[in-house]
Image: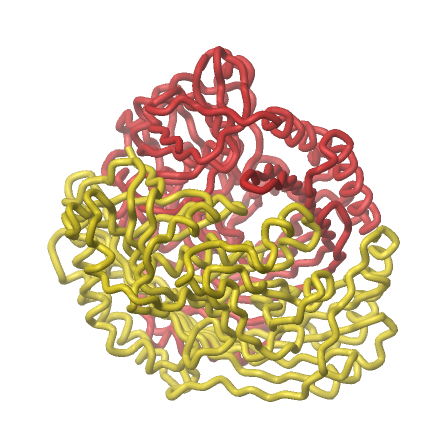
Chain colours: A red, B yellow
């Protein structure tokens, strides 16, 4: 007897999430390979609705019976489930599997890592270079007693580089990474170019203007402004009243040039998938269109509570989370795509004249993120003078309110988006109204 | 599984082999506002094999116990592949193999506490916060417990079996007035049983009151201040800003930084002592034996203001010709051990808070931590709230307090160390190298530091 049938004998409804992750990874430390590893991890999670109440349990390696018993025990003391599990759904399959990924060998990963290390060291022999490369697949299925039955295999390839400049009293590090689903999308040359560009810019140390100079957020710096909005667009935050966006759908809450879409169906997008972790088809959800707040995203529960339509955003793990079988699904974004504007990074640098480029920050997501307030140390940033990069900055902090900057502080949105933080496809943005404190 | 583990590592053809098998039982209750968002339990088991071949590691992670012998071969093969590319081979400092059993101490085993009782406890705290004031619009109350039973064997004959309890409680309030949203929270964790999370009503009220108070607090003005860190924040500071660079793996392939972090170098005032300790009864960062089977050692990082030691795994100890300290920890069976902190704290000094306040004309009292992050010597951490200090007195509350700076300069700028002391295991955990959240404890007295950069508008 299958686990769903077993659960159905003692509960009105059940949902089984099953995941098998298999892959290999290599790690370079100080320019050298240090370890090669493999993983084969299977985990399962069961949600039940028994006597109208919701229960959840998860396991790796445990028996079917134990999992059913744990979920029922949780339901016995749970609250009424405001929603039903997904029924059978039609949906076009989103391409998320590249069969060639499995053909990548550990030797390939080592060779790619060595190649990148060599290229960085040729130009910067004194840097400590670390790298991680991985490839693998996840087999995910979601089945429900309501007839929902989804399964797919998703592939991934990832590569990250980290170069550290270390001198007494002067240490800094540049990081760049990509996580993609298709071998062809892993542009190792572009990744390396990005690293080398920042390393070259950082040969000199410079002081940025203090006060409120123009700030150019590189794609990897843009999340400082985006993260509060991603959290605030969660239908659950809105329902609970912790989002400042509550009650503002349809309002021109942002700069008219700003459009942000949450997309699950982008072919081979890093967080793309045919169905979410509750078995609902993913789709395309405009969050902000031409500055107007359009939608919030929901999982089944938040949608039921808020009397809204679920959007296929039921994901294991939080807004920036990577998920896993252990946690129940909650509302989280898929790929966040910011519509590009005009102008290359160089154009924007020329336009800003005197200012600060923010490539990476420390303390991202700390602080009172709900309110939009941010205050971050600029880990990787560059001073611009007369439209030219003059060097990297040290001991520099930026502070402001993301909602205010996205409404009144945008000067230009660039034309050249990049994938950052796994699932954000964002262009550079030139902003004002951010204060800069330099030591 | 014990016999299988011993047999598998003994049979391995790699230069060195270790295997760890874990069984974890956990539960979680979470409320937000009036919603029960989680009431759940989980059980999992999984293992990891690590082999050393000609100075390179091979690692295999798995969940099917019958895979163990195959995984030893797989890890050996991976190590062999990697070893062809190694110029600076990994070697392990010698340790006496131990045969040890350690049962975690607790009064009330959470596995025996009905989910219903856990729910009632969290619900009570949640209702206290929600009912505290009309400005409170939401909450986040989270209870977690986990029992981790790990068995470990290596090819040198070590065998360790230990049980590690972990309970946490997060009590957070969200207050809203007009468009403004503020949070107050108390975050707690212990290596103990259910008894540790009971009776925290006062903390719930503190969180609620703080959220409301922050609504009328002004954002701090950015600039440079003499700052007094409260024990919570001072503990986070020493962990984030200093602890991480004392993790010796960071120095392993890093000649320039090794020169900076030379034992014997003065880093601060005479009264500054910093410790990483593997065992304090009930402390969340406890690790009686690490995940390389090495017994704990109390590591003095700074003694009388002078760098006196680092935290080590066997590999970093070999490289730096030091003794292993028992700091090789893995967050779970999915990961290999890396150098991590345990219970890290600043020892108390001699000054009272009043003495520390005296003479500060215009300063800042920074309290509790939202979080912290470091990039080597650069650190940033967010205080949950602060107060102005003027003419030696603690004044009105301020918010959005973010401190940043260079750790070496900041340690040097420590002026006085308080006589009080607080040890805090948070409900979160430490993250490093993709391994998160590892239970750790931070501790400190009040600490006064001059010339600290505070971000703000």
Would you identify the image quadrant in which residue A54 lies? bottom left
In the rendered image, residue A424, in percent from the top left (x then y), is placed at 52, 36
Q: Residue furthest left?
A: B134
- Residue A153 lies left or right of residue B109; in this view the side is right
Name the residue nearer the viewer: A304 or A137.
A137
Residue B422 placed where, x, y %?
33, 69
Residue at 64% over, 83% down: B160
At horizontal 33% and vertical 61% (from top left) the residue drawn is: B417
Number of callouts in the render? 0
Left or right for A198, reference B91: left
Residue A402, picture quadrant: top left
Q: Residue A269: in sight, yes or no?
A: no
Identify which residue, A97 or A111, lies in the foreground.
Answer: A111
Image point (34%, 62%), residue name: B37
**B112 above or below A226?**
below
Q: Quadrant of the C terminus of chain B?
A: top left
Looking at this view, is B303 or A306 the one in front? B303
B49 relative position to B133: left or right: right
Identify whether A397 is placed above or below A65.
above
B76 relative to B196, above or below: above
């Amino acid at each position: 007897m299958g686990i769903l049938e077993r659960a159905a004998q003692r509960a009105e409804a059940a949902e089984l999430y099953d995941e098998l992750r298999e892959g290999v990874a290599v790690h370079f430390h100080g320019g050298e390979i240090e370890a090669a590893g493999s993983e084969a991890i299977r985990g399962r999670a069961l949600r039940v609705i028994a006597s109208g109440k919701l229960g959840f349990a998860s396991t790796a390696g445990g028996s079917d019976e134990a999992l059913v018993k744990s979920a029922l025990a949780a339901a016995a003391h749970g609250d009424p489930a405001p929603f039903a599990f997904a029924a059978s759904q039609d949906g076009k399959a989103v391409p998320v599997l590249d069969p060639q990924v499995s053909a990548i060998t550990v030797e390939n990963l080592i060779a790619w890592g060595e190649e990148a290390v060599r290229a960085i060291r040729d130009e910067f022999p004194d840097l400590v270079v670390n790298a991680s490369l991985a490839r693998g697949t996840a087999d995910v299925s979601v089945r429900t007693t309501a007839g929902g039955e989804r399964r797919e295999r998703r592939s991934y390839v990832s590569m990250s580089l980290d170069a550290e400049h270390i001198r007494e009293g002067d240490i800094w590090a540049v990081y760049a990474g990509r996580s993609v689903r298709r071998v062809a999308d892993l542009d190792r040359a572009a990744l390396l170019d990005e690293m080398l560009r920042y390393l070259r810019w950082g040969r000199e140390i410079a002081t940025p203007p203090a006060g409120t100079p123009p700030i150019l957020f590189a794609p990897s710096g843009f999340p400082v402004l985006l993260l509060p909005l991603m959290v605030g667009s969660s239908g659950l935050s809105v329902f609970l009243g912790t989002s400042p966006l509550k009650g503002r759908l349809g309002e021109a809450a942002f700069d008219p040039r700003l459009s942000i879409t949450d997309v699950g169906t982008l072919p081979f997008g890093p967080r793309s998938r045919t169905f979410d972790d509750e078995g609902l088809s993913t789709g395309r959800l405009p969050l902000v269109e031409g500055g107007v707040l359009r939608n919030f995203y929901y999982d089944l529960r938040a949608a039921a509570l808020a009397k809204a339509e679920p959007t296929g955003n039921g994901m294991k793990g939080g807004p920036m989370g990577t998920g896993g079988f252990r946690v129940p699904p909650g509302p989280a974004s898929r790929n966040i795509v910011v519509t590009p504007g005009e102008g290359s990074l160089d154009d924007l640098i020329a336009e800003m004249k005197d200012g600060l480029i923010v490539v990476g920050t420390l303390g991202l997501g700390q602080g009172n993120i709900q309110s939009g307030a941010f205050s971050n140390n600029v880990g990787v940033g560059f001073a611009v003078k007369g439209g030219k990069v003059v060097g990297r900055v040290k001991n520099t902090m930026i502070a402001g309110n993301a909602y205010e900057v996205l409404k009144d502080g945008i000067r230009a949105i660039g034309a050249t988006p990049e994938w950052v933080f796994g699932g954000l496809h964002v262009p550079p943005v030139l902003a004002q109204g951010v204060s800069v404190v330099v030591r | 599984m014990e016999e299988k583990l011993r047999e598998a590592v003994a049979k391995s053809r790699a230069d060195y082999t270790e295997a760890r098998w874990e069984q974890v039982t956990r539960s979680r209750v979470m409320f937000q506002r009036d919603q029960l968002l989680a009431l759940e339990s989980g059980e999992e088991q999984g293992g990891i094999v690590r082999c050393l071949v000609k100075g390179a590691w091979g690692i295999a992670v798995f969940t099917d116990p019958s895979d163990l012998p195959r995984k030893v071969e797989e890890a050996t093969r991976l190590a062999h592949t990697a070893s062809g590319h190694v110029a600076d081979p990994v070697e392990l400092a010698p340790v006496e193999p131990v045969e040890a059993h350690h049962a975690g101490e607790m009064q009330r085993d959470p596995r025996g506490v009905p989910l219903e009782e856990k729910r009632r406890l969290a619900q009570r705290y949640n209702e206290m916060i929600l009912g505290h004031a009309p400005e409170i619009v939401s909450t986040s109350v989270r209870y977690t417990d986990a029992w981790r039973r790990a068995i470990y064997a290596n090819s040198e004959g070590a065998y360790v079996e230990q049980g590690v309890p972990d309970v946490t409680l997060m009590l957070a309030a969200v207050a809203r007035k007009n468009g403004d949203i503020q949070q107050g929270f108390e975050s707690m964790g212990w290596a103990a049983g259910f008894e540790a999370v009971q009776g925290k009503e006062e903390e719930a009220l503190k969180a609620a009151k703080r959220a409301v108070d922050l609504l009328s607090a002004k954002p701090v003005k950015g600039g440079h201040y003499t700052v007094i860190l409260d024990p919570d924040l001072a503990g986070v500071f020493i962990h984030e800003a200093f602890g991480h660079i004392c993790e010796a793996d960071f120095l392993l392939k890093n000649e320039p930084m090794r020169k900076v972090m030379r034992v014997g170098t003065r880093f601060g005032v005479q009264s500054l002592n910093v410790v990483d300790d593997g065992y304090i009864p009930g402390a969340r960062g406890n690790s009686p034996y690490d995940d390389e089977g090495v017994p704990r050692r109390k590591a003095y990082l700074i003694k009388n203001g002078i760098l006196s030691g680092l935290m080590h795994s066997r590999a970093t100890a070999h490289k730096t010709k030091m003794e292993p300290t028992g700091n090789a920890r893995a967050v779970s069976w999915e990961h290999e051990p890396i150098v991590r902190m345990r219970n890290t704290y600043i020892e108390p000094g001699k000054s009272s808070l009043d003495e520390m306040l005296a003479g500060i004309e215009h300063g800042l009292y920074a309290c509790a931590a939202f979080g912290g992050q470091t990039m080597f010597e650069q650190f940033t951490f967010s205080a949950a709230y602060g107060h102005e200090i003027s003419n030696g007195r603690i004044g009105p509350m301020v918010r959005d307090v973010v401190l940043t700076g260079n750790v070496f300069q900041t340690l040097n700028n420590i002026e006085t160390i308080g006589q009080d002391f607080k040890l805090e295991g948070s409900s979160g955990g430490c993250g490093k190298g993709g391994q998160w959240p590892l239970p750790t404890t931070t501790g400190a007295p009040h600490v006064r530091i001059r010339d600290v950069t505070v971000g703000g508008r």
